[in-house]
Structure formats: C-alpha cells, structure tokens
Amino acid sequence: MTIYTMTTAGTIDEKMDALFAEKGDSAQLALDGRLVEEAIEEVDLPALLASAVRDFKPHASTVDEQDIEASWPALRDRLARAEARFREIRGMVAAAKPARSGGDDPAARLRAAMAKFPAMAK
C-alpha cells in the first residue's frame, strides 16, 4: 500500500512533514544497521507552533478541498485503468518467450509486449 501526503506551504503541516522526514531518515538508518549515535533532540512544540504562526501566509494560494473531493472519483477511475493496463502489459512481458539465443532477453520481451499496444510503443 502506498500513502501519499499533501502539505500546504506556509502551514504547520509543512514543518511537521520536514520533521517526519527527518525522523524517517533516522529510522531507515536504524533499520539498515548504520545508525550513528547522535544526541537525541526533543521537539520543542511551542517553538514549532510559533515558527508555523510566524511563517503562515494567509493569502497564499490554496486548493479547495471540495474541488479535490469532487475530482477524486474520476482520478480513482483513471488510476484503476492505468493499473489494469500495467498488469496486463506486465503479464504479457512475463509470458513472452525468451530470445532463441538461449538466454533471456528482457528488452526483446518488452518490445514484443509493447508491439501489441502501438500507441505505447512510441
């Protein structure tokens, strides 16, 4: 499962996103076994909020949430069709026979599968 997040410039979301990214980097280092011990720094919530208030741009352009909500069904359908097309092509590539040279030629398999979709072969 993939989760996409959206943040608005000039809001606390932007600052929290940066903080989460930093924490994520630390977690990845720990999981990779390459964590270098550093001083643990507590998050100063009042300072974070003060910074967000100071940097807030009340007249910055935003996206209307109702517009996003209204466009979501069409986007979801487009994504579902794209995923189905991807899975179909992936299946054809996997099913294509390897080159006669005795070895597997993934590029040739991809070309053969893409030939069945002339609009995509360009």
Image: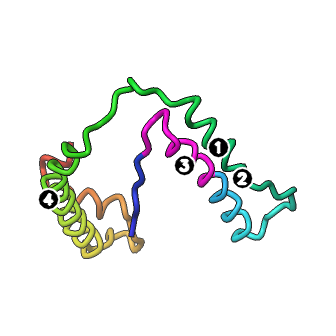
Compare residues 54 and 18 and report the one nearer the observer. 54
User: Does residue 20 show up magenta in the picture?
Assistant: yes
Q: CA gap, disc 2 to disc 3?
A: 13 Å
- The picture places residue 108, in percent across and down from the top left corner, at 31, 60
Q: Residue at x 63, y 37 (%)?
A: 50
- Magenta region, main secondary structure: helix
Residue 112 within the segment the image draws in magenta: no
Q: Is residue 65 above or below residue 107?
A: above
The residue tagged 4 is: 77
Q: Which residue is mark 2?
A: 43
* First in residue order: circle 2 vs circle 3: 3
* Residue interval drawn in magenta: 7-21
Q: Amino acid at mark 4?
A: Asp
98 over 73 or under it: above or below? below
Identify the residue at horizontal 42%, vertical 27% (top origin): 58
* Residue ID at (71%, 68%): 32
